[in-house]
């Protein structure tokens, strides 16, 4: 129920108690909504009203929007209602900081029929209103509306007390805005952390992980709870060179305050070595005390691989041109030499001691001829003649051919395949790949062993060829696909280079994993 006009100082203790309670609520961080609830519930002891509304100025001070309201009946002019300041009756209040009292809203609406907001609160049954500007350090931030269902209830004598209340509301408004701004900034930073493709890590002064972003999870594989509080050195490989690099990084950060574009290797959860581009910055407080550092890491493994592939492709192009020239220059004389030696061999009796020497010459000519043919194959552009073929069939045909050569009888061959093995590919080129890879495996097991071929079909076909042979030293594995590099005493060093070229022409890949003394696995993938 509305109350009539009450003497302002009928209960000074109650007024002070209310002001003190509002102040405590604000100091304790109570929200603006809770402060408004308190005022709506307690202010009736001093001021008559049926409705209280709070409207805030926009950042450009061009509009007022109802941000909060309380009423003892159903509202028509609801939260979110907005109107322009310029040209409105509230503009002078905001400019001069004065209050406005309307004794009879119905009469006011009759004189100002264009006032939409007045029409709406009259529709709610309001008959009089008192409006005060919300001021913060002398600048308007909004207005507070007190409305009553009785006409002519508000007097200027209410102003002093209401200004105290409204002053506290202005503090609550400003605090809410600051908290909103802080929350928005926090959400923005959180959004950066969650959506950055790069790894963003914050460390304390003891190099313990404080913040672990979503990008860090994607790159390294660990979830934030797994690493928070643990040392950053978990990401550093255990090798002495990596530890020395890490120590040098810390020295540079301590000396310069930051390090930019530092290329280093870090370790993922699965043990995978990841090449990253690191930018790290020392974090200090206003007194210069070390708080830790930030580390932004970008996975550049694929970029490095692309750079290496570009260098390799340029080198291979140059080698290919040279190979083609050399091969053509050698092929014809070699054919002539081979023919002449065969004539000499035919003229030498079988029992003559010179005949094995001529046979060895012919064997070496055949090796040179194979090298020339490999050079020509390597130098030519690869344009697969694609047909739908069964990989299982082509693999088995290649093994049937190789199983006849010397040494293959000591090898136990096993094939495992699941699903459809059909792919669009050039059967002759793939046959050459299988021959190269399977022959390498057989030659690696001179004393015999197990040769296991596993084919798995999904979006493409993945074929793994594993042997239990001598294996390859780790430092030699990256060089296996270079032309003319070989770990065998007899070989051209072109087999794997040609195989990779064939697979890449099909849009596929080839990878070698080997452990010296234990064996080698070559994995090839061919897309559908």
Image (cartoon, rainbow, N blue to C red):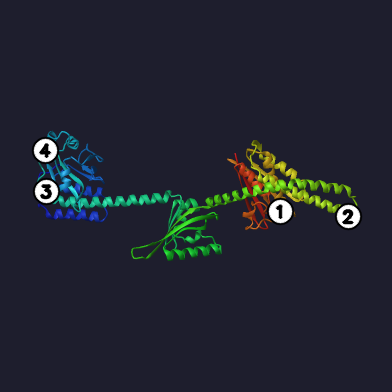
- Between marks 1 and 4, how big is the CA–CA gap? 104 Å
Q: Position of residue 34 (x, y in %)?
A: 25, 49
Q: Which secondary structure, mark 1?
A: helix
- Residue 221 visible in this rendered orientation of the protein: no
The residue under the point 64% across, 35% down is 388
Q: Position of residue 472 (x, y in %)?
A: 66, 56
Mark 2 vs 4, N-terminal side: 4
Which of pointers 3 and 2 indicates the residue nearer the eye? 2
Looking at the image, is mark 1 or mark 4 nearer the viewer? Answer: 1
Q: Dot 1 corresponds to which residue?
A: 444
- Residue visible at 14% across and 47% down in the picture: 98
Task: Tell me the CA gap for discs 1 and 2.
Answer: 34 Å
Q: How many residues crowd around disc 1 within 10 Å: few (fewer than 14), some, or many (20 or more)?
A: many
Disc number at residue 104?
4
SS at mark 4 in the image: loop
For disc 4, the neighbor class at 10 Å (few under 14, some 14 to 19, many from 20) is some
Observer-nearest of 307 and 316: 316
- Mark 3 to mark 2: distance in Å? 132 Å
Q: Secondary structure at mark 3?
A: helix
- Is residue 226 in sight in this rendering? yes
Question: Disc 1 or disc 3, which is closer to the eye?
Answer: 1
Q: Earlier in the sequence, mark 1 or mark 2?
A: 2
The residue where tag 3 is placed is: 158
Q: Earlier in the sequence, mark 1 or mark 4?
A: 4
Q: Are marks 1 and 2 in contact (CB under 8 Å)?
A: no
The answer to whether the residues at label 1 and label 3 have Cβ atoms under 8 Å apart is no
Q: Look at 62% across and 49% down and name the residue there.
A: 318
Instruction: Say which label, 4 or 3, has the lower sequence index.
Output: 4
Q: State the image coordinates of residue 67 (x, y, percent, origin top left).
A: 25, 44
Label disc, if present, on residue 353 of the rendered structure: 2
Q: CA distance from mark 2 to mark 4?
A: 135 Å
């Amino acid at each position: 129920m509305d109350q009539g006009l009450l003497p302002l100082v009928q209960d000074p203790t109650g007024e002070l108690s209310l002001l003190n309670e509002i102040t405590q609520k604000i100091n304790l961080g109570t929200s603006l909504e809770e402060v408004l609830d308190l005022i709506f519930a307690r202010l009736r002891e001093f001021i008559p009203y049926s409705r209280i509304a709070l409207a805030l100025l926009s950042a450009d001070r061009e509009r007022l929007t109802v941000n909060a309201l309380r009423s003892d009946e159903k509202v028509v002019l609801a939260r979110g209602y907005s109107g322009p300041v310029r040209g409105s009756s509230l503009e002078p209040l905001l400019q001069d900081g004065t209050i406005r009292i309307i004794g009879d809203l119905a009469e006011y609406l009759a004189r100002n029929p264009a006032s939409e907001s007045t029409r709406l609160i009259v529709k709610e049954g309001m008959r009089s209103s008192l409006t005060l500007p919300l001021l913060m350090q002398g600048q308007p931030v909004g207005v507070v509306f007190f409305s009553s269902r009785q006409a002519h209830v508000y007097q200027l004598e209410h102003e002093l007390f209401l200004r105290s209340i409204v002053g506290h509301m202005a503090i609550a408004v400003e605090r809410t805005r600051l908290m909103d701004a802080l929350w928005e900034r926090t959400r923005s930073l959180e959004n950066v952390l969650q959506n950055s493709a790069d790894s963003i890590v914050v460390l304390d002064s003891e190099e313990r992980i404080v913040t672990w972003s979503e990008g860090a999870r994607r790159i390294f594989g660990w979830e934030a709870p797994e690493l928070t509080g643990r040392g950053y050195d978990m990401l550093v490989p255990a090798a002495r060179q990596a530890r020395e690099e890490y120590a040098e990084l810390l020295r540079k950060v301590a000396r310069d305050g930051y390090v930019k574009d530092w290329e280093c290797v870090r370790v993922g959860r699965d043990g995978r070595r990841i090449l990253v581009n690191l930018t790290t910055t020392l974090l200090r407080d206003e007194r210069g005390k070390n708080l830790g550092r930030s580390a932004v890491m970008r996975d550049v493994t694929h970029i490095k691989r692309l750079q290496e592939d570009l260098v390799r492709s340029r080198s291979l192009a140059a080698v290919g041109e040279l190979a083609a020239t050399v091969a053509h220059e050698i092929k014809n004389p070699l054919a002539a030499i081979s023919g002449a030696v065969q004539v000499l061999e035919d003229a030498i009796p079988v029992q003559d001691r010179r005949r094995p020497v001529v046979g060895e010459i012919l064997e070496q000519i055949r090796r040179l001829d194979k090298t020339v043919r490999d050079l020509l194959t390597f130098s030519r552009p690869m344009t697969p003649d694609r047909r739908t073929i069964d990989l299982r069939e082509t693999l088995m045909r290649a093994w049937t051919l190789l199983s006849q050569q010397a040494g293959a009888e000591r090898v136990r061959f096993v094939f495992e395949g699941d699903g459809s093995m059909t792919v669009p590919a050039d059967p002759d080129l793939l046959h050459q790949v299988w021959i190269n890879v399977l022959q390498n495996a057989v030659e690696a097991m001179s004393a015999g062993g197990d040769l296991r071929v596993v084919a798995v079909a999904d979006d493409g076909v993945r074929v793994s060829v594993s042997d239990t042979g001598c294996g390859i030293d780790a430092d030699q594995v990256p060089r296996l696909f270079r032309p003319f590099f070989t770990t065998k005493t007899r070989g051209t060093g072109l087999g794997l280079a040609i195989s990779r070229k064939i697979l890449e022409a099909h849009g596929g890949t080839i990878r070698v994993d080997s452990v010296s003394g234990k064996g080698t696995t070559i994995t090839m993938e061919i897309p559908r």
